Amino acid sequence: MSAVISASDLDATSFGLEPCNGNEQDGALPDSVRVPESASGVLGSGMERLHHRVLSAAAAFVVPVVLTSCTGGEALKRFSFTAEAMDPQVAIVDLPRGGELSFWNSLDLGYVEGTSVAFKLSIQSPGEPQPTEVICDALEPSMTLMSKKVQVQGRIDEAWKLARMRCGYGPVSEAQQLQVTAVPVFSGPVEIRRLDLELKR
């Protein structure tokens, strides 16, 4: 039996954050906070309380910034799939000139080792006779938030709150409205406790 757990709870001390691409210092507190001293040059009880308040305020500010910087841009649409509802789902989204789509997922699955889980997306832009097909591997994202994985004798239970997949669309040469059709694709049996796909720009 093996287990890899980044975070199992949703509290501030166990975010399980992996470094965001392009900035490995997200979440670091400043080391230059100046703390007033007493007349003797030693921190008094009042000064210690002030120091604690300064650090607490800094930490409270940093956590939302880290989460915002790690969870991508503007959310456009969320598709939710269940064992009873696996049919393709459709959304209409708008992209400005130069805009791009990124694809994220949130999942809680049980499957046998070697099983693949992917999202097949069909993106139809105006004036194009054929849609663009995009395949996103759901189990090999570039970044995850609040993840856990337990493997017992070839059986894997894996979950995360949010993950960015290694696929995208764009940038587009001009502003346009797109029709996006999404459906999950499995290579074997999968137990679905949660399986969401989110479009962001």
Image: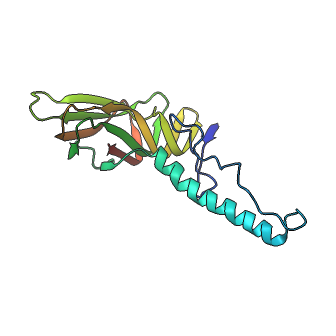
* Looking at the image, residue 63 lies above or below residue 176: below
In the rendered image, is residue 174 in sight?
A: yes
Quarter of the picture holding the N terminus: top right
Q: Where, quadrant-wise, is the C terminus in this rendering?
A: top left
Residue drawn at the location 36% of the way across and 29% of the way down: 187
Residue 195 x/y as whole percent: 38, 46
Q: Residue furthest front?
A: 39
> x and y percent of residue 138 in the render?
40, 35
Residue 184 pos. (x, y %):
31, 38
Q: Is residue 110 found left or right of 4 in the rendered image?
A: left
Q: Quadrant of residue 181?
A: top left
User: Is 54 situated above or below 66?
Assistant: below
User: Is 163 displayed left or right of 51 in the figure?
Assistant: left
Q: Position of residue 189 (x, y in %)?
A: 39, 36
Q: Relative to residue 69, is residue 91 drawn left or right?
A: left
Identify the residue at image location x=47%, y=27%.
114
Who's the residue at 63% across and 57% down the image? 59
